[in-house]
Each structure stands twice: as structure tokens, then as C-alpha cells.
């Protein structure tokens, strides 16, 4: 790890510190300078006064976690790009949420998706739904804190637990001070940074490998360019029908009724703005997963065989994205 850290310059650390500082300043700005979060509606829903573009970016930033950014390239690197085909369900799922789910939640003028459970099924179901969301969020948060800390450790050599602590404290601070409005605007910045970073990783990886025609040839020779596979064998790891059906069902639970998604929808200035933000997420989500998959394709060609410089076999799959960042 120490050797990896020496490849980073002062500018790299400045950028990292600047991103954390932007998050803190955003929380302070919306929590103090803008008059604070004086009502529950302001804190949880940003006073229902947010336009479509910020909502679209915060939705994608909320659901496309570091697990996705590291996991999808590693998945494609290890097993091929079949996983990317799951994005086709977004062509059905997101428009359905836009037309059927959003009007129901927005029209009820509620603040959580679990209030709907209370209205429809009574308080016990509302309490159970809220409890299950808390349990899920605790485990999910642990993963999304650990994953970026693992990547940062790989390129800096800093202690893993210190990185987890710093990330957790910063995120908790700006969220508790600035409410949803601070979360939305930090998500906007992070979404832009993430999209830019992945594109740069693909460009640098392609240059380091040679050119894209070579990358495609390596993947094609390894039979890794067939996206749509229809075997009837249920023991297959992935098939196109199983991916499409499985992710369609799971994505409805995440994008359609989870508190994270509903909270963003309810923060919109109008139902029309909420629908526009969901429509914008169709190309955003598909595009992001595709370029993450493309990064995995580039990584496979880059790591194909021994290192051309020193002849050593290169790193484990979960470290390939951070390793590419040092190119």
C-alpha cells in the first residue's frame, strides 16, 4: 500500500480534501446561512421546492453506490458483460414508476413511504415497514462506507478504519445540519465527479492497453462479447431472461417504494418535475451501468496476461478500479 501511495501527488490529496470540504460547506450553508431547517418538511423534503435536474442526479447518486462503481467493472472483468443487459428493465421500470407510483405518493402529501402503509394497512404494517427499512439501511450503509474506504486505502495507504470514520463523520455532519437539500446538492456534485471519473478511467485504461480495437479483440477471442444468452439451464450464473426478470422485480422495490426514492420524488416542486426527473434517469442509469461495464471490458484487456512492464501478474478483481486510477 505504501508504494501505491507514492504515486499520488499533492494535487490528488487537494482534490480529495476539496470534495470533503464541499460537503461540509454545503451542509453549513443550507443548515445555517439559509435559515436552517426549522420544520420537518424542510428537513426531510427540502420544502418540496426542488427542480427536476437536481432530483434526477440525487436519485442516481443515491442508488449508484461505490458498490456499483467498483462491483460492476469487477463483475464484467471476471465473468463478462452479460450483467449490463439488466439495464434494459429500466426502460419498463422507471416509466412505470413515473406514471403509476409517483402520482400516488405525491398526491397523498405525505413525507415517508411508510405513511402510505399506515393509511392503507394500519399502524402495525407501517411500523414493520419502517423497522425493516432501518435494518436494511444499517447493513447497506456499512457496505457503502467500507467500499470507498477500501478504494481510497488502495491508492493512499491510509488506515482503512480511519477512512471509514472520516467518511462517516463528514456524511453524518452535512446530512444532520443541512437536511435533504444539502444531501441533494452534494449528490449533484458527486454524480458529476463520478461520471467524469469513470470516463477518464476508460480513456486512460484504453491508452495504457493500446487501442479499443485491441481491447475488443481480446474480449472477443475470450468469448466475452455475447451479451444475450438464452440457455434453459437453471444452474447458469446469469442468463438474459433471469437477469431481466430478477432485476426488474428487485428494482421496483428500490426505485418505486423505498423511502430513499419516495423522499426524492416528494421533494419535487411539482408532480411534473418529479416525473421529468424519473424520465431523465432512464438514460442516466443505463448510461452509467454501460460505461461501468465498458470499464470492466477495458480492465480485462489491460490485465490480460502478465504486466508488460515487469512481467508480474496483476492485482485482484476488487482492486482493479483503484489500480487503474493510478495509471
Image: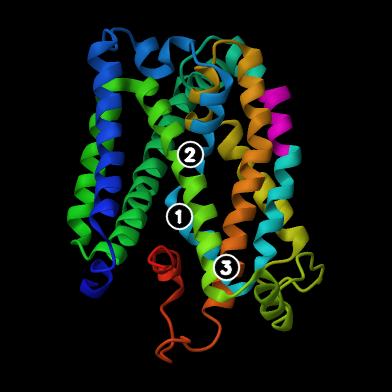
Q: Along the line of sight, which residue is nearer the eye, 233 or 228?
A: 228
Q: Magenta part mainly helix, strand or loop?
A: helix
Give the mark, 1 or 2, whose residue is nearer the N terminus: 1
Which quarter shows the N terminus?
bottom left
**Does residue 28 appear in this view?**
yes
SS of the residue at dot 3? helix
Label 2 sits on residue? 192
Residue 42 in picture, x, y percent from top left: 37, 11
Q: In this view, does 81 lie above or below 114?
A: below
Give the mark, 3 or 1, whose residue is nearer the N terminus: 1
Question: How far apart are the two marked residues, 3 and 2, measured between alpha carbons?
Answer: 21 Å
Relative to 137, 237 lies left or right: right
* Contact check, label 3 and label 1, Cβ < 8 Å: no
Q: Residue 67 carries which label?
A: 1
Q: Is residue 120 above or below residue 16?
A: above
Characterize the local packing of mark 3: few (<14), some (14-19) or many (20 or more) Cα atoms within 10 angstroms.
Answer: many
Residue 263 in picture, x, y percent from top left: 48, 24
Question: How far apart are the two marked residues, 1 and 2, measured between alpha carbons?
Answer: 17 Å
Which quarter shows the C terminus?
bottom left
Relative to 140, 213 lies left or right: right
Residue beneath the point at 54% across and 53% down: 199
- Does 100 lie within the magenta span? yes
SS of the residue at dot 2? helix
Residue 221 in picture, x, y percent from top left: 72, 83
Report the span colored magenta.
93-101
Please identify, in this view, whether the residue under mark 1 or under mark 2 is nearer the observer.
2
Q: Along the line of sight, which residue is nearer the eye, 213 or 166?
A: 213
Characterize the local packing of mark 2: few (<14), some (14-19) or many (20 or more) Cα atoms within 10 angstroms.
Answer: few
Label 3 sits on residue? 206
Amino acid at each position: 500500500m505504501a508504494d501505491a501511495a507514492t504515486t499520488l501527488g499533492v494535487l490528488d490529496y487537494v482534490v480529495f480534501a476539496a470534495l470533503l470540504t464541499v460537503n461540509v460547506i454545503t451542509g453549513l450553508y443550507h443548515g445555517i446561512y439559509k435559515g436552517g431547517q426549522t420544520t420537518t418538511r424542510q428537513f426531510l423534503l427540502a420544502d418540496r421546492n426542488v427542480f427536476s435536474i437536481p432530483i434526477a442526479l440525487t436519485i442516481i447518486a443515491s442508488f449508484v453506490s461505490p458498490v456499483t462503481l467498483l462491483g460492476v467493472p469487477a463483475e464484467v472483468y471476471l465473468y463478462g458483460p452479460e450483467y449490463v443487459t439488466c439495464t434494459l428493465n429500466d426502460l419498463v421500470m422507471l416509466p412505470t414508476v413515473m406514471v403509476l407510483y409517483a402520482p400516488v405518493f405525491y398526491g397523498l402529501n405525505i413525507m415517508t413511504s411508510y405513511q402510505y402503509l399506515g393509511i392503507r394497512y394500519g399502524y402495525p404494517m407501517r411500523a414493520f415497514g419502517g423497522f425493516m427499512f432501518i435494518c436494511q439501511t444499517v447493513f447497506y450503509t456499512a457496505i457503502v462506507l467500507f467500499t470507498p474506504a477500501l478504494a481510497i486505502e488502495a491508492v493512499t495507504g491510509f488506515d482503512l478504519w480511519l477512512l471509514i470514520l472520516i467518511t462517516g463523520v463528514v456524511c453524518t455532519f452535512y446530512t444532520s445540519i443541512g437536511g435533504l437539500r444539502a444531501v441533494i446538492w452534494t449528490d449533484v456534485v458527486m454524480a458529476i465527479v463520478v461520471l467524469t471519473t469513470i470516463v477518464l478511467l476508460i480513456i486512460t485504461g484504453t491508452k495504457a492497453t493500446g487501442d479499443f480495437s485491441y481491447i475488443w479483440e481480446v474480449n472477443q477471442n475470450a468469448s466475452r462479447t455475447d451479451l444475450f444468452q438464452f440457455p434453459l439451464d437453471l444452474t447458469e450464473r446469469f442468463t438474459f431472461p433471469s437477469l431481466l426478470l430478477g432485476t426488474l422485480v428487485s428494482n421496483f422495490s428500490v426505485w418505486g417504494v423505498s423511502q430513499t426514492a419516495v423522499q426524492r420524488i416528494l421533494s419535487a416542486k411539482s408532480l411534473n418535475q418529479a416525473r421529468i426527473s424519473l424520465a431523465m434517469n432512464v438514460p442516466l442509469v443505463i448510461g452509467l451501468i454501460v460505461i461501468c461495464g465498458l470499464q470492466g471490458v477495458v480492465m480485462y484487456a489491460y490485465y490480460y496476461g502478465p504486466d508488460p512492464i515487469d512481467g508480474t501478474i496483476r492485482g485482484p478483481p476488487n482492486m482493479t478500479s483503484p489500480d487503474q486510477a493510478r495509471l
